[in-house]
Image (tube, rainbow, N blue to C red):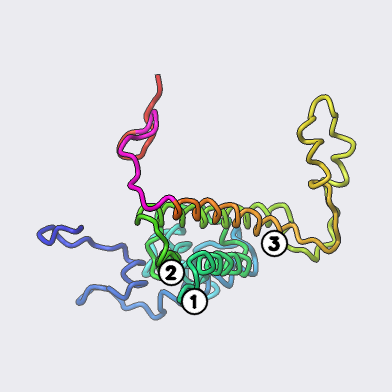
Amino acid sequence: MVDPASPPVELPRYLQLLWDREPAGRRGPKPGRTIQEVGAAGVAVADRNGLEGVSMKSVAAELGLTPMSLYRYVDSKEQLLEVMLDVAYGPPDRSLVASGPWRERLSRWAYALVDALLQHPWISMVPMAGPPLSPNILGWTDAGAQAYEGAELTAQQKMSSLLVVDGYVRSHVRMSLTMGFAEPDTQEPNLYATYLPTLLDPDRFPALLATSPAILDDDPDGDFFRDELRFGLDLILDGIESLTRQGPRQPPSSTPPGMSRSGSYGNRV
């Protein structure tokens, strides 16, 4: 809880603009573009040229501005990426989590997140420099938390399990995009099916060989990306559901070995 006696926190310029909280009487020239237009220009560059094509220069050129002009909106490329992410995600569809059992609501939220990541594949490649602070992305988090209404979980269990779902979706999408599995219509050969039969020595990789029929499955009607996504998500939801049957429990007060109470790992002797 914020201490009302403490001085107000001054938001970075880009957050002031995203949240429409620019202080009155601010000195300097008034920006001729909105922060959303800056973000949309960055999204257009990334959609066209990939994340590596995004720079202050390229986004300024997309807007018809000089690179120095962008510093009226953002102080760095990292802040520009935050604005781009907020624009790319857009506001969440609250109707997805408005009704139905919590598991169905959370599944709809997760699949909507997948669609957002696939619509702009570069999103999953953006390094996370800190917790999300922009309005649309926090809106997605809020919608995910709303999906848990009615679930017998503590507030901490809800947020922690939402982070697990979010992390799984992002990881699966990023891995699938990198390995070419997110595009079922691709004509690229299945490298597992091509190379594994000649590499798996039963004496060296007995367990992997035992599961190789599933790995080598090259069913033309299958969809590795969606099938694996569904399997992993159901696995996580089963775990969350088991928590609801146990009833809400407060997390233990002890911390894992080697971790400080602040949540960081210290040096081990």
Specify the label residue 211 is tagged with: none
Residue 32 horizontal/vertical position (percent): 39, 81
The residue that appears at 66% across and 55% down in the rendered structure is 231
Are the residues flagged by discs 3 and 2 in contact, CB closer than 8 Å? no
Q: Which residue is mark 2?
A: 143
Name the amino acid, label 1: Asp
Tell me the quadrant of the picture where the N terminus can be found: bottom left
Does residue 23 appear in this view? Answer: yes
Q: Is residue 50 above or below residue 232?
A: below
Q: Position of residue 112 (x, y in %)?
A: 56, 69
What residue is disc 1 on?
Answer: 93
Q: Earlier in the sequence, mark 1 or mark 2?
A: 1
Describe residue 247's horizontal placement relative to residue 116 as left or right: left
Residue type of the residue flagged with mark 2: Ala
Q: Quadrant of the C terminus?
A: top left
Q: Residues within 10 Å of mark 1 (few under 14, many from 20)?
A: some
Residue drawn at the location 83% of the way across and 51% of the way down: 217
**Mark pair 1, 2: CA separation:** 8 Å
Q: Relative to the observer, which residue lies in front, 96 or 3?
A: 96
Sort mark 3 into few (<14), some (14-19) or many (20+) by Cα contacts within 10 Å: some
Helix, strand or loop under label 1 = loop
Give the magenta-colored segment's residue range.
246-259
What secondary structure is the stretch in magenta mostly built from? Answer: loop
Q: Look at the numbered disc 2 and give the secondary structure of its residue.
A: helix
Asked if the residue at tag 2 contacts the one at tag 1, i.e. Cβ–Cβ closer than 8 Å, the answer is: yes
